[in-house]
Image (cartoon, rainbow, N blue to C red):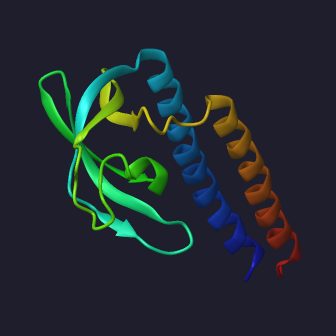
C-alpha cells in the first residue's frame, strides 16, 4: 500500500479508537461518582462453554421510572448463586449499580469494574501501540 493510504487509514482509525476508549473511561468515572444501587432481575440466559466459561444473560433493573435491560457475562462461580447447571434461574434478585444521569451505564455489584486509572493505563498503552504500528507501516510503505 502507498503511504497516503496508510495516512488516511490512521487519520480515520486512531480518533475512532480514542472515542471508544474515552467513552469507556468516562463511563467508569461516571459510575464511580454517582452510582446508585437498585435490585435487578436475572433473566433466562445461556451458558457459554469453552475456555472462558460464563453465563450470558440480560439483567432487568429499574432506574427511576424506566425499566432497563443490560447484557452481562457472569463467571460460573458467581452465576451459580442465581442459576443452575441447566441455565434455569433459581434466584432472580441481583444488585445493580447504575448512574442516574445516564441509566444505561450499569454494572453488577458482584462484578465491579476496574478502577478508572487502570482503563487510562490500558488506553495509553493501546494508543502507543496503534500509533507505532501505523507509523511503522507508513514509513515502510512505497511513496
Q: Residue at point 87% right, 76% down?
A: 140
- Residue 114: give x, y in percent of width and height: 60, 36
Q: Residue at x 81, y 69 (%)?
A: 138
Question: Which residue does the image show at 76% across and 65% down from the upper left?
Answer: 134
In this view, which residue lies farthest toward the top?
34
Q: Is residue 75 visible?
A: no
Query: Image quadrant for the N terminus?
Result: bottom right
Displayed quadrant of residue 36: top left
**Farthest residue, direction left:** 65
Asked if residue 32 lies left or right of residue 125, the reply is left
Q: Quadrant of the C terminus?
A: bottom right
- Using the rendered view, name the quadrant where residue 115 is placed: top right
* Residue 32 image position (x, y, % from top left): 50, 21
Q: Position of residue 73 (x, y in %)?
A: 41, 54
Image position of 68 (left or right of 98): left
Front position in the image: 126 or 103: 103
> In the drawing, does residue 1 fall left or right of residue 17?
right
Labels in figure, total: 0
**Relative depth, front residue between 127 and 35:** 35
Where residue 61 sits: x, y (%)?
22, 35
- Residue at 47 percent across and 32 percent down: it is 27
Q: Quadrant of residue 98?
A: top left
Between residue 70 and residue 37, name the one nearer to us: 37
Of residues 2 and 20, the one nearer the viewer is 20
Q: In the figure, 62 relative to 44: above or below?
A: above
Q: Is residue 82 above or below residue 35?
A: below
Q: Is 74 rendered above or below residue 47?
A: above
Can residue 108 be seen? Answer: yes
Amino acid at each position: 500500500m502507498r503511504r497516503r493510504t496508510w495516512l488516511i487509514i490512521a487519520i480515520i482509525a486512531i480518533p475512532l479508537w480514542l472515542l471508544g476508549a474515552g467513552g469507556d473511561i468516562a463511563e467508569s468515572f461516571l459510575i464511580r461518582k454517582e452510582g446508585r444501587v437498585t435490585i435487578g432481575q436475572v433473566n433466562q440466559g445461556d451458558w457459554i462453554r469453552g475456555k472462558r466459561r460464563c453465563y450470558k444473560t440480560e439483567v432487568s433493573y429499574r432506574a427511576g421510572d424506566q425499566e432497563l435491560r443490560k447484557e452481562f457475562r457472569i463467571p460460573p462461580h458467581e452465576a451459580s448463586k442465581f442459576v443452575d447447571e441447566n441455565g434455569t434461574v433459581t434466584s432472580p434478585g441481583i444488585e445493580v449499580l447504575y448512574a442516574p444521569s445516564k441509566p444505561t451505564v450499569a454494572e453488577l455489584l458482584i462484578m465491579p469494574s476496574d478502577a478508572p486509572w487502570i482503563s487510562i493505563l490500558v488506553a495509553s498503552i493501546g494508543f502507543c501501540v496503534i500509533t507505532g504500528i501505523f507509523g511503522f507501516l507508513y514509513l515502510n510503505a512505497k511513496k
